[in-house]
């Protein structure tokens, strides 16, 4: 093995000694002046002194945990691209020719080749249950678990969950294995000490220590992003390894880093134990996940949307659609409702709700607390409804079938033609050219037969509407939560809002596929 390169370090010269300064004469002492009060220095609390120094050593803790952390090696067969390796020839008499011959011996330039990868994992059950990342073992033909004592065992894959990047393996050891337990990741505070153990760059059993840098990070890795960020050194090969608290409990599973070089720059991310435990339990019991499903489409509540909906705070998740045949397709939830609590848990943002719903058991009846604006002139009122959750995996199949059945690119029957169709009346407002929905426009923009509202046929490029991402072909369904069906209705409603001193218009738009979203456009 070649030694790793050593990074060059700039050496700065020591600073020159400062010039000596002659001592100033002491000021005269007034013997009649009262003596200055003596103030004893106040020492910081013992806990603060200890915390400022950090842990004196983690040697005992690391020693007790190392045997439960494993290395994961995988191999898979992949198609050889490009017709194989070209023939290699060295100069006549060169000893390199023997090396080239060995390299290509038995290789006919076609067929498959084997590739290998390395990662980390940890044992959570002495009977041989091992946790790692899904991306560590994805598409592997064989999975081998390597232990700290040098032993190796082939592993069986019990189940995977790409949404959270988790996988559960099973080995059959001759005797019970050293194992670790999950801890309470919700109790972690920013600044708490944590320790990572893993297999960086194939160097097994490596220990690094750092602190919790942040919580609740969203790095767009999946639908349930809620990562713990740490500055404990995490590198390639650490994926799937544990992040421990100072009590030796697993509070996170290391899964990603941000790095321009591929090495640690002090920004690593771990799946929190609270999210992982539920997934691991389901994979162990069923071999698959069984997540709760509410059957709605969501949008984030911005300050502008909150103002348009008459809500005091920009928090919660606004309902933008009800999946037909889903758990919420019972008339209790409506488009425009803002969900603020689910089953007793606060919903701060639209990202929180899918994760909390997914962690709730299937078929459980839950209470959904929301804000609904029944009267456009009055603020939104609180309301509670009960919904019995479905299963997300079933819902995903249902939505896929629904989208395929309503594909706007499918052929539609229409006797109308552009030549004999009567041009639709148009109105221009807010930088939008609006038209009634007719047969030619349905065909032009791929709108379904059930599309209702006013179609946008043109957007002024320099308008605020264009800045908000509104495009031609979208259907305007509501203005300030009032339905519209004709272009003039939109213009009249905008004029009314302007007369009432409103600075923004809350628009409900539908895409060609029927997906809804709220957009707030300034009124010029």
Image (tube, grey):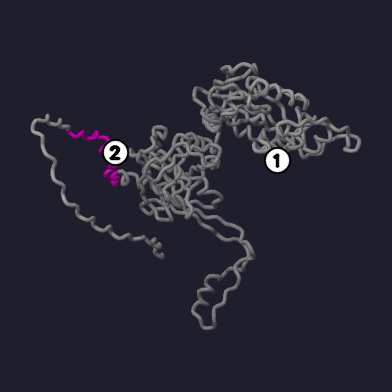
Q: Which one is earlier in the sequence, the residue at label 1 or at label 2?
A: 2
What range is drawn magenta here? 40-60
User: Residue at (53%, 28%) from the top-left corner?
Assistant: 361
Residue carrying label 1: 461
Position of 443 with respect to 468 (left or right) is right
Which mark lies nearer to you, 1 or 2?
1
Give coordinates of residue 411: x percent, y percent. Answer: 81, 39
Quarter of the image that includes the N terminus: bottom left
Give coordinates of residue 61: x percent, y percent. Answer: 31, 43
Q: CA distance from mark 1 to mark 2?
A: 57 Å
Q: Quadrant of residue 304?
A: top right
Callout 2: helix, strand or loop?
Answer: helix
Whether residue 43 appears in magenta in the rendering, the answer is yes
Whether residue 68 appears in magenta in the rendering, the answer is no
User: Residue at (67%, 34%) from the top-left corner?
Assistant: 399
Give coordinates of residue 317: x percent, y percent. Answer: 57, 28
Q: Which label sits on residue 51?
A: 2
């Amino acid at each position: 093995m070649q030694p790793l390169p050593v990074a060059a370090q700039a050496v700065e010269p020591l600073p020159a000694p400062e010039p000596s300064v002659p001592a100033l004469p002491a000021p005269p002492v007034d013997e009649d002046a009262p003596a200055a009060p003596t103030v004893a220095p106040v020492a910081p609390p013992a806990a603060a002194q200890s915390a400022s120094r950090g842990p004196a050593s983690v040697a005992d803790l690391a020693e007790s945990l190392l045997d439960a952390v494993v290395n994961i090696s995988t191999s898979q067969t992949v198609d050889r691209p490009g017709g194989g390796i070209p023939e290699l020839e060295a100069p006549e008499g060169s000893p390199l020719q023997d090396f080239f011959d060995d390299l290509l011996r038995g290789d006919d330039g076609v067929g498959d080749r084997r590739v290998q990868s390395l990662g980390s994992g940890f044992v959570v059950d002495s009977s041989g249950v091992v946790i790692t990342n899904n991306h560590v073992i994805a598409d592997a033909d064989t999975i081998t678990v390597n232990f700290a004592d040098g032993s190796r065992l082939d592993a069986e894959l019990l189940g995977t969950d790409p949404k959270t990047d988790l996988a559960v393996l099973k080995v059959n050891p001759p005797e019970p294995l050293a194992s670790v337990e999950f801890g309470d990741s919700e109790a972690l505070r920013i600044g708490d000490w944590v320790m990572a153990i893993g297999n960086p760059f194939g160097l097994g059993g490596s220990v690094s220590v750092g602190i919790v840098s942040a919580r609740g990070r969203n790095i767009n890795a999946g639908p349930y992003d809620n990562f713990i960020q740490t500055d404990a050194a995490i590198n390639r090969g650490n994926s799937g390894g544990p992040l421990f608290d100072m009590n030796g409990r697993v509070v996170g599973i290391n899964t990603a880093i941000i790095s321009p070089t591929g090495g640690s720059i002090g920004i690593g991310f771990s799946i929190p134990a609270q999210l992982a435990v539920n997934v691991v339990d389901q994979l162990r019991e069923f071999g698959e996940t069984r997540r709760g499903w509410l059957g709605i489409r969501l949008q984030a509540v911005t300050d502008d949307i909150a103002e348009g909906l008459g809500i005091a705070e920009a928090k919660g998740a606004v309902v933008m659609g009800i999946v037909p045949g889903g758990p919420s397709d019972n008339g209790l939830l409506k488009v425009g409702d803002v969900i603020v609590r689910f089953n007793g848990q606060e919903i701060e943002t639209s990202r929180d709700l899918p994760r909390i719903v997914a962690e709730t058991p299937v078929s459980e009846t839950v209470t959904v607390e929301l804000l609904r604006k029944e009267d456009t002139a009055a603020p939104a009122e609180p309301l509670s409804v009960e919904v019995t959750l479905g299963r997300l995996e079933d819902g995903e199949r249902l939505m896929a079938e629904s989208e395929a059945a309503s594909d706007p690119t499918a052929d539609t029957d229409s006797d109308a033609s552009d030549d004999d169709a009567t041009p639709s009346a148009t109105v221009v407002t807010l930088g939008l050219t609006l038209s009634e929905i007719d047969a030619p426009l349905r065909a032009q923009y791929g709108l379904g037969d059930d599309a209702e509202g006013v179609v946008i046929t043109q957007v002024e490029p320099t308008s605020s509407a264009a800045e908000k991402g509104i495009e031609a072909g979208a259907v305007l369904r509501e203005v300030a939560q009032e339905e519209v069906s004709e272009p003039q209705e939109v213009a009249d409603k905008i004029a009314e809002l302007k007369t009432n001193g409103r600075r923004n218009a809350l628009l409900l738009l539908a895409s060609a596929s029927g997906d809804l979203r709220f957009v707030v456009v300034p009124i010029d």
